[in-house]
Amino acid sequence: MSAELDNLIDIVVTGKIKEAKDATQKALDAGHAPIEIVFDSLAAAMEIVGQKYAAKQYFLPQVLLSANTLYQGLNLVLPMLQAGDGGDKGTVVLGVVEGDVHDIGKNICKALLTGTGMKVFDMGKDVPIKDMLQKAKDENADIIAESTLMTPTLDAMKQMEKMLKEEGLKGKMKTMIGGGATSKDFADQIGADAWTYDAVECSKVAQQIIAAR
């Protein structure tokens, strides 16, 4: 791997946010294709960050800093990508369900999912289920990923499963849920396709779902 790509990996992993855009431009100037920068450098860096987070070597502040650093580079190269570059890595609609405004975990999931090359539509926090489902239909999403830390908002996730069945989309669009108020038992109870306990597993399971299409 080139010095430019190695340097960009180090910048993202260590969260040197002010250096990321210039380093990405240097990689482009050195002749690296945007898709190469995304997968061999930016995605590789977030995989390292994810491993550090899983090993408890990194905590939320470091992960968020690396995620924000990642986006400095992504924002530069993503507009340069041609449709279909790198193959179809899948489309995810992501959001915190209505009634909950806690989005740190969701933001980390977004960074790690984007780092895998997936197209991620971030609906933000306190999102009505009908809006999330409509976005998934508009974008022909493979996965709807919902999170909540609050027990009173769990019913929204149950409603998502009901609406997907009513519209004949259950199974065509996979659902993933996560967040402190959720559990595997709850996911099984409502019929969600997957439950993940943190952002690292979210990224892994999403890739498995896409690979199994």
Image (tube, rainbow, N blue to C red):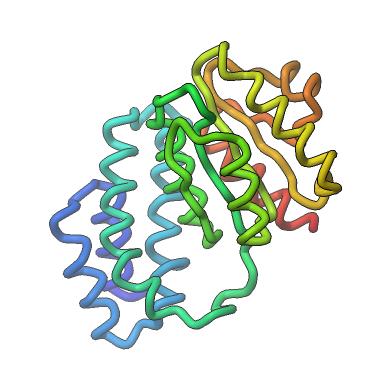
Position of residue 168 measured from the top left corner of the image (x, y, whole percent)? 86, 48
Position of residue 159 measured from the top left corner of the image (x, y, whole percent)? 71, 28
Position of residue 102 measured from the top left corner of the image (x, y, whole percent)? 40, 25
| Residue at (61, 58) in percent of width and height | 91
In this image, 189 relative to 14: left or right?
right
In this image, 6 relative to 189: left or right?
left
Image quarter of residue 29: bottom left
Q: Quadrant of the N terminus?
A: bottom left
Q: Residue furthest left?
A: 18
Nearer to me, 51 or 199: 199
Image quarter of residue 45: bottom left
| Residue at (48, 22) in percent of width and height | 99
In this image, 12 relative to 94: left or right?
left
Position of residue 31 measured from the top left corner of the image (x, y, whole percent)? 32, 87
Q: Quadrant of the C terminus?
A: bottom right
Nearer to me, 8 or 133: 133
Number of marks present in the image shown: 0
Q: Residue furthest top?
A: 151
| Residue at (50, 19) in percent of width and height | 149
| Residue at (57, 75) in percent of width and height | 86
Nearer to me, 103 or 35: 103
